[in-house]
Image: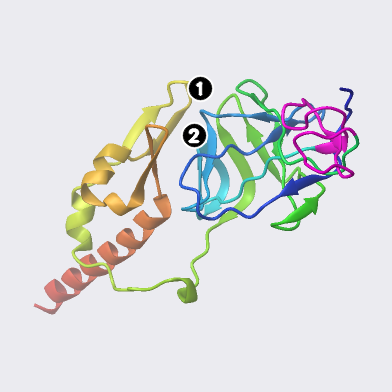
């Protein structure tokens, strides 16, 4: 089989699978596709993107995942390194002349410092994969960088809303720590997922035997803790 580079890929919308998916990456020279299975993964059922480090003005959880291929394909598009054209085929897994490929073979990546996650402009159909210099992934350090990272927080998407109570008590059980990432040797600050799980278990998720933390959820607790403390201060001033 002879392929050059993918032009279109077939994608489908998945919001229910409770498993780790791996965003497909290319480096600045267009080499790929590759994945980083230990440093960047996405769970469609929770909309949670997990990475060792996020760089930039982080204002929420990261979401999104895409994989695929396309192009002039002869042979099996599911195991091709680069499927270039995959449309005139009955199935995307076995195509001589194709326009859209459903599956591509990817390789784990842990050394490239600048990779570009691939995206599509629609959740379904045959889409051309796209990337942006405004969103990059450092596979060697596990760092996803973007100008802003927003998470959905619309009231219309939520139910059972209530104000967090006993916030000060919850904060007093938490511990902020300095630490060094084992793989990259980079120093950082934060919390330990196992410790947070004992106090605020809803902010901790597990994937591939690793725990990740929803740091945005901690912000809500801190807001109410400050308000509780201010109320105590005001009462003391009044006395």
Q: Secondary structure at mark 2?
A: loop
Is 206 placed above or below 122 here?
above
Asked if 157 appears above or below 109 in the picture, the reply is below
How far apart are the alpha carbons under marks 1 and 2?
10 Å
Looking at the image, the residue that sits furthest to the left is 239
Residue most extreme to the bottom: 238
Quadrant of res 28: top right
- At mark 1, the secondary structure is loop
Residue at image point 63% right, 39% down: 23
In magenta, the rendered stretch is 70-96
Which residue occupies the foreground of this view, 2 or 161? 2
Asked whether the residues under the numbered discs 1 and 2 touch, taking CB atoms below 8 Å apart as contact, a structural biologist would say: yes
Query: What secondary structure is the stretch in magenta mostly built from?
Result: loop
Q: Using a 10 Å C-alpha cutoff, classify the residue at mark 2 as few (fewer than 14 neighbours), some (14 to 19) or many (20 or more).
A: some
Which residue has dot 1 on it? 184
Magenta span contains residue 78: yes
Task: State the image coordinates of residue 4 (x, y, percent, origin top left).
Answer: 89, 28
Q: Is residue 172 above or below residue 162?
A: above
Q: Is residue 118 magenta?
A: no
- Please say if 228 is above or below 132: below
Going from N to C along the chain, the mark reached first, 1 or 2, is 2
Q: Looking at this view, is 191 or 25 the one in front?
A: 25
Percent position of residue 52, x then y: 49, 34
Query: Mark 2 highlights which residue?
Result: 52
Q: Residue at x 72, y 48 (%)?
A: 119
Left or right: residue 167 versus residue 107 is left
Quarter containing the N terminus: top right
């Amino acid at each position: 089989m002879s392929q050059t580079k993918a032009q279109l890929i077939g994608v489908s919308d998945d919001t229910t699978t409770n498993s780790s998916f791996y965003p497909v990456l290319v480096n600045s020279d267009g080499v790929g596709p590759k994945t980083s299975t230990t440093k960047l993964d996405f769970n469609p059922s929770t909309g949670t993107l997990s990475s060792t480090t996020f760089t930039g003005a982080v204002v929420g959880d990261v979401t999104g995942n895409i994989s695929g291929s396309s192009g002039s394909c002869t042979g099996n598009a599911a195991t091709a390194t680069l499927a270039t054209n995959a449309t005139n085929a009955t199935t995307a897994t076995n195509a001589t002349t194709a326009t859209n490929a459903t599956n591509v073979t990817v390789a784990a990546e842990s050394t490239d410092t600048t990779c570009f996650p691939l995206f599509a402009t629609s959740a379904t159909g045959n889409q051309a994969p796209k990337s942006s210099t405004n969103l990059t992934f450092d596979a060697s350090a596990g760092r996803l960088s973007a100008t802003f990272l927003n998470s959905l927080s619309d009231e219309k998407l939520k139910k059972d809303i209530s104000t967090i109570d006993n916030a000060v008590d919850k904060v007093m059980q938490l511990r902020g720590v300095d630490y060094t990432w084992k793989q990259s040797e980079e120093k950082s600050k934060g919390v330990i997922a196992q410790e947070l799980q004992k106090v605020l278990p809803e902010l901790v998720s597990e994937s591939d035997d690793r725990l990740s933390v929803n740091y945005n959820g901690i912000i809500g607790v801190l807001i109410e803790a400050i308000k509780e403390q201010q109320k105590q201060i005001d009462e003391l001033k009044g006395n």
